[in-house]
Amino acid sequence: MRHLTKLFSVLLLAAVLLSACGAPAATEAPAQPAATEAPAQPAATEAPAQPAEFVFGLLMVGPYNDHGWSQAHYEAGLYVEKNVPGAKMVYADKVNPADRPGTTPAQLAEDLVSKGAKLVIFNSDDMKDSATEFAKAHSDVYVIMASGDQVWKDGKAYTEMANMTNIMGKMEYGKMMAGCAAALTTQTGQIGFLGPLINDETRRLAASAYLGARYCWTNYAGKNAADLKFKVTWIGFWFNIPGVTSDPTQVADEFFNSGYDVVISGIDTTEAVTEAKKFAGEGKKVWALPYDYIGACEEGKEICLGVPFFNWGPAYVTAIKSAADGSWTSQFLWNDPDWANINNPDSSAVGFQKGAALSADAAANLDKFIGELAGGLNLWKGPLKLQDGTEYLKDGEVATDFQVWYLPKLVEGMDGASE
Amino acid sequence: MRNNKWFNLGVQLAAVILALLFVTVILLLVKAPPLAAFQNIMIGSVGSWAKFSDVLISFVPLLLVTSGLLVTFAAGLWNIGIEGQITLGAIFATWMMRTLQDSTLPPALIIILTILAGMFGGAIWAALAGALKTFGGVNEIFGGLGLNFVATALNIWLIFGPWKRPGVASMSGTVPFDVKLWLPMIPDTRLSAWALGIAIVGIIVTYFLLQGTYFGLRLKAVGKNTHAAYLLGIPTWQYMMVSFALCGVFAGLAGAMQVTAVYHRLIPSISSGYGYLGLMVAMLVNYQAAWAAPVALFFAALNIGSIQLPVVLKLDSTLAGVLQGALVLFVLLADGVRQRFVKK
């Protein structure tokens, strides 16, 4: 007991110490923010010529430097700062209850608003409810909910919120290109897809990879569609949770050990690349395609066929400009690549960065495929059956956005669970 | 040893200073301003009522979990399965609320039944770990860890399977409950006074249970020396099972609070690591109930205050975790050193 009295007094002392430390910092502290605010300083004197400051907040589910989903958003934020005069980003990363016990994204968004943010970007499906809650409670703050469908009038979850916009890139095209690169490279005719958990989004992305693979397999490699094996193994989550999900390392190994020589990753982490690298080091001919982030091939250039990536920058610039100048409208944006140049950082929502391991032949055919897509080729076109044999699209029927977004099952020709 | 008191205090103070120095060195190594970092943690946690109410939101489950752990620690048990027990509490609470939400029962009654269900769920999961130990000879650390994994898997399966929301199953969790089924909040905050009250009652009950009852005394006897306690006629395995169940009740209550007072739905990481944090708090207070509340509050303040680090200083906020870990390590270390000196 006495021991604890002391401990508590010690903690109190520590608190006093902390605040004491805080006091002198007050003299130093301004130096810190001043560095970032510096450009604003002359602005006050030069007045009208300088654009008004527009602070926007970014909430990221993962670390800002995760080489994946969150980093793609972080870099888009930097891109906005560069391309919208006066724009300034404030952000919080690792916005999830496991990393920040007791917090909700809405609460962190309010913190960013207290730092001056007039618009807040919620970057993950995890934050869907929180984004809605925040948007409803703060009608004077603009909200971008990336990957969500809340304000899609034709969607299943429509809620009217004038201050919210949904933004998503048409990664379906990126996955088709990944599938095509895989089909043009595989020597065994077996492609593995390392899937996260099963929902409408992951189903449609896995199916897109298959459709791209099948098209290039039959049209460029000149082979029979029936000879292409495409298997999806879902690990159960976006990343490995020991004891809970299947171990993605094991799943990738299992693919490579059972004749699947190309693995397309649909998860947030890079096991497909690291395992392919390991197998290649042992002399096996295997390849992999990571996901999300333009720089994701770095970890295993020698086996990387390329990476389909998101480029959030241009859409964020447009949205933030409209918020700043008052022309904002609530929209559901499911953005296409810029078909003139899918990797144009200033205009394309999704791209495909070719990897060093992609052969010159395959690269040339992939370019042809991209050209066909640009010219209007639509792989979401009938006849197309679902995995269980039921008809999904009649002959010649083109899938609506609704049908693609909410794909109910994997499509015929794919191995793996649909739900 | 009259000056022992001051000697002890000196040792503890040295431990805290060492922990702070340790973190300061780390900050200097990454070329970050330590003073500004500490200052921002302070401002971000107690700088305003809004911030402090956020701290209290985090304090509620942490204190509940710590209360439960004090009971199992008293019996000499390492209840690592606490995370799973929080999760099961949340699952049972969600199940009850889903079952009753469309009924004609008054909302207050639904909330009470939901909380009771959560307590029951936590107790069952804890009893399972206890049974594995008592009847299966499985050490509670391993049994608890295994049950944590099962609980997480069950939780994710429910969210993406049977309880998935209409449309796209979401990482965001199950469909949020109607506002009338939320524990009422203090205006302009997200804090529920009810939740705070429950947590405070919880630690008081724990204190009196352990300090002022025959049960607490016998439980501590079991913890100090099981064999001797058995020889003295204490039914040891029954006491262990009861301590597991009690801890589970607290953990389940924490889970129910997460559902009814904080997230208002079931989310994938509903336990939020409070179980492991609670273990640290319990260790730091040397398994004594009296100071669990202030230390838990301090830890909650670090959690919330550290959010300012990335926002203001672009620093990694795991710094709070480093400081919490360093505090526990250095205090335990200092205690070891002190005991050596005292023995001499």
Image (tube, rainbow, N blue to C red):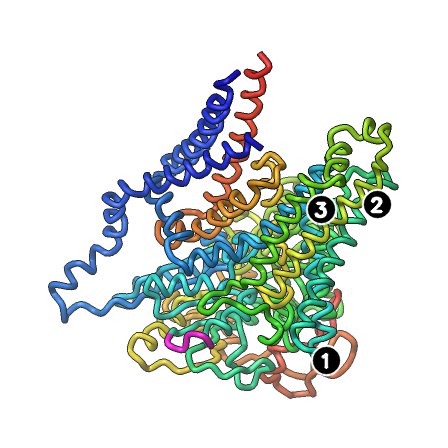
Q: Where does label 3 land, which residue? A: B81
Q: Main secondary structure of the magenta part?
A: loop
In the picture, the quarter occupied by the N terminus of chain A is top right
Q: Where does label 1 land, which residue? A: B103
Which disc, if any, is residue B131? 2
Comes first in the chain, label 1 or label 3? 3
The chain containing the residue under callout 1 comes to B
Q: Nearer the viewer, residue A349 or B332?
A: B332
- Amino acid type shown at disc 1: Ser
Check contact, mark 1 vs mark 3: CB within 8 A: no
Marks 2 and 1, how far apart at CA: 36 Å
The chain containing the residue under callout 2 comes to B
- The 10 Å Cα crowd at callout 3, few under 14, some 14 to 19, many 20 or more, is many
Comes first in the chain, label 2 or label 3? 3
In the rendered structure, the answer to whether residue A57 lies left or right of residue B87 reads left
Magenta stretch: give its range. Answer: A136-140
- The 10 Å Cα crowd at callout 2, few under 14, some 14 to 19, many 20 or more, is some
